């Protein structure tokens, strides 16, 4: 065996396409190019002051040691209050678990439950990490393409067709990355009806973008809409997107105790629990003032409105108004098969993204990275001025795209 032989599942995993673009942006910037990146998966705001202050106080008070593996009791109590208050879920602190980011919570749920060959239904377009995590944990992603016709959402018919004897999980993400799609009560009820007929299927509700939801829509999560599903639903959330705390690495979940116990067992041999200081900061976030959430929602909605309007003026691009998160998922098929201003053939969405980066100095991620080719994910977690400049650069690029000679 070679010294450098890797775990075969890791070898089969694809590196994150979003990180690949971010790395390329860093290289171009180091060469002196002024690139506007619309690839970010995080709010551009600073963590609110009262949350930072709570972390500093935690350090100065000596809260610098290992915590309980499942999280500080005070944080788990704050999480239980959050699930009761915001999601109508009847849970106690023992029904919660804290991890080092939502990403770890999802990974550990899959790692704790998947055996070789188990299937996980992943609606596409999907967050890039889902299929890779499933594969790393020994499972098989069962990708279900959900196109523009259904608003990029899973329909009951498609779900029903995807569930088979090997199905272990369904992953549902609302508001969604990369489309911003939000499931309504009726849509969740229709999916719940299918799931009730398949009692062997666990459900992961990834609610990380819960608070970034626009036009007065209500956020709803599956276990709230259909309480009969609560005993087999892991409702996952975190402080990253809602409180601009991506770097603090705190995610959490509620779900059946047997599953939380298994995840805790895994975490005990892995991280011994999340960062103590970040946990204190997360208590301040969850129990603190709500003004920041309302403010960031308002800012993102305003940016969404002007950005989508500008994008729709660019020939070859079509973009629906997303209902949540901070991503627009723009159809770029009108550019494919044509010639870029710099003379490249735009063979697919990846070629469009690369040409935009090299010729217009704007970084976006191709839809194929999220399992749906023909689109571009354009994040608007950026200040207004840069956002307008980026949209104008995209507009100029599109106006100069020509038919192939
Ligand atoms: N789920 C989705 C859909 C995401 O987009 C992200 C982050 O980009 C996460 C989960 C994980 O967030 P974190 O690990 O920062 O809590």
Image (cartoon, grey):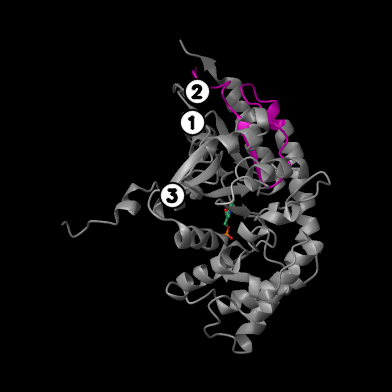
Does residue 293 appear left or right of residue 41 in this picture?
A: right
The residue where tag 2 is placed is 340
Q: Does label 3 or label 2 sit earlier along the sequence?
A: 3
Judged from this view, the residue extending furthest toward the left is 1
Q: Is residue 352 above or below residue 253?
A: above
Magenta span: 310-338
Instruction: Judge the density around disc 2: few (<14), some (14-19), many (≥20) Cα neighbours within 10 Å.
Output: many
Q: Position of residue 217 (x, y in %)?
A: 81, 46
Quadrant into which the C terminus falls: top left
Query: What element does badge 3 sit on?
Result: loop
Q: Is residue 361 visible?
A: no
Q: Quadrant of the N terminus?
A: bottom left
Q: Position of residue 279 (x, y in %)?
A: 62, 75
Q: Is residue 89 above or below residue 68?
A: above
Q: Residues within 10 Å of mark 1 (few under 14, many from 20)?
A: many
Q: Of circles 1 and 3, which is in front?
A: 3
Dominant secondary-structure state across the stretch colored magenta: loop
In the picture of the structure, the residue carrying the numbered disc 3 is: 118
**Mark 1–mark 3 contact, CB under 8 Å?**
no
Mark 1–mark 2 Cα distance, whole angstroms, equals: 7 Å
Residue 58 in the image: state x and y as whole percent.
64, 83
Q: Residue at x 53, y 41 (%)?
A: 163
Q: Quadrant of residue 204?
A: bottom right
Could you tell me how far apart the alpha carbons at marks 3 and 2 are, in whole angstroms? 44 Å
In the visual, does 228 lie left or right of 273? right
* Magenta stretch holds residue 334: yes
Q: State the residue in front, 46 or 270.
A: 270
């Amino acid at each position: 065996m070679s010294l450098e032989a890797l775990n075969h599942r890791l070898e089969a995993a694809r590196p994150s396409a979003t990180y690949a673009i971010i790395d390329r942006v860093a290289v171009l910037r180091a060469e002196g190019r002024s690139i506007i990146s619309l690839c970010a998966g995080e709010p551009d705001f600073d963590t609110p002051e009262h949350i930072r202050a709570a972390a500093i106080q935690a350090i100065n008070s000596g809260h610098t040691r290992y915590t309980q593996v499942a999280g500080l009791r005070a944080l788990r109590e704050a999480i239980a209050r959050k699930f009761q208050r915001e999601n109508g879920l009847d849970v106690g602190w023992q029904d919660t678990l804290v991890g080092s980011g939502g990403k770890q919570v999802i990974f550990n749920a899959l790692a704790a439950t998947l055996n070789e060959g188990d299937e996980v239904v992943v609606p596409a377009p999907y967050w890039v990490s889902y299929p890779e995590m499933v594969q790393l944990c020994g499972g098989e992603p069962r990708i279900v393409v959900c196109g523009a016709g259904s608003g990029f959402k899973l329909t009951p018919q498609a779900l029903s067709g995807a569930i088979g004897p090997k199905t272990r999980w369904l992953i549902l993400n609302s508001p969604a990355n990369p489309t911003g799609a939000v499931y309504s009560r009726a849509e969740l009820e229709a999916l719940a009806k299918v799931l009730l007929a398949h009692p062997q299927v666990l459900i992961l509700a990834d609610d990380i973008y819960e608070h970034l939801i626009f036009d007065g829509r209500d956020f709803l999560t599956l276990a709230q809409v259909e309480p009969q599903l609560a005993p087999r639903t892991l409702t996952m959330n975190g402080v990253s997107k809602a409180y601009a705390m991506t770097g603090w690495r705190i995610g959490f979940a509620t779900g059946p105790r047997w599953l939380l116990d298994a995840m805790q067992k895994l975490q005990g041999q892995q991280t011994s629990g999340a960062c103590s200081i970040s946990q204190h900061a997360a208590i301040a976030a969850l129990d603190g003032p709500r003004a920041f959430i309302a403010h960031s929602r308002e800012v993102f909605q305003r940016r969404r409105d002007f950005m989508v309007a500008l994008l729709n003026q660019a020939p070859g691009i079509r973009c629906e108004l997303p209902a949540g998160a901070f991503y627009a998922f723009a159809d770029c098929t009108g550019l494919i098969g044509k010639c870029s201003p710099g003379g490249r053939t735009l063979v697919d969405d990846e070629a469009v993204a690369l040409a935009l980066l090299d010729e217009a100095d704007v970084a976006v991620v191709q839809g194929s990275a999220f399992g749906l080719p023909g689109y571009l994910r354009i994040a608007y977690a950026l200040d207004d001025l840069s956002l307008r400049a980026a949209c104008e650069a995209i507009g100029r690029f599109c106006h100069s795209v020509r038919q192939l000679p």
